[in-house]
Image (cartoon, rainbow, N blue to C red):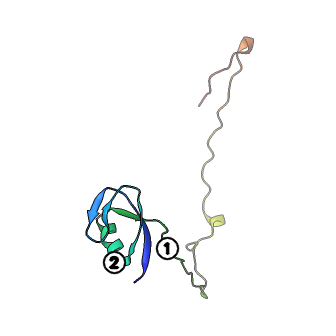
Amino acid sequence: MELVEVISRAHFENPQTGAVSRKQRLRIGVDLAEYLKSLDLIDYANPTVTVAKTIAKTEVENLGGGVPSMFLPQAPVLPEATVNPLPRGRRGRQQK
């Protein structure tokens, strides 16, 4: 039987483990750990790390649609906001 280390999240009592207080570390069986985890009473102390595998693709994907961006119409340019200088060094309002 494989044992896993868990940390309790709440106070509870179980016939296999007895009275357990919050934040107590336990080494229990995998089946009991899964049952207590489903009740949200424990967290795994050292969760297993899963490794994602990626498979190299041999085909070229067409990600750009059909028309290159150099052939699309250009967006209109917005006028830049200018600041009018005021006398005595005060800052002016922006014009739109």
Q: Earlier in the sequence, mark 2 or mark 1?
A: 2
Q: Nearer the viewer, mark 2 or mark 1?
A: 2
Answer with the quarter of the image where residue 63 lies. bottom right
Q: Is residue 22 left or right of residue 49?
A: left
Dot 1 lies on which element? Answer: loop
Q: Nearer the viewer, residue 93 or 19?
A: 19
Residue drawn at x 32%, y 74% as measured from the top left? 32
Left or right, 42 with reference to 65: left
Marks 2/1: CA–CA distance: 16 Å
Between 43 and 23, the residue placed more toward the observer is 23
- Pointer 2 local density, CA inside 10 Å: few below 14, some 14–19, many at least 20: few
User: Where does the N terminus fall, quadrant-wise?
Assistant: bottom left
In the image, which disc is placed on residue 31? 2
Residue farthest toward the top in the current orientation of the protein = 88
Task: Tell me the quarter of the picture where residue 11 sits.
Answer: bottom left
Residue 48 is tagged as 1
Residue at 40%, 64% (x, y): give it.
43
Q: Amino acid at mark 1?
A: Thr
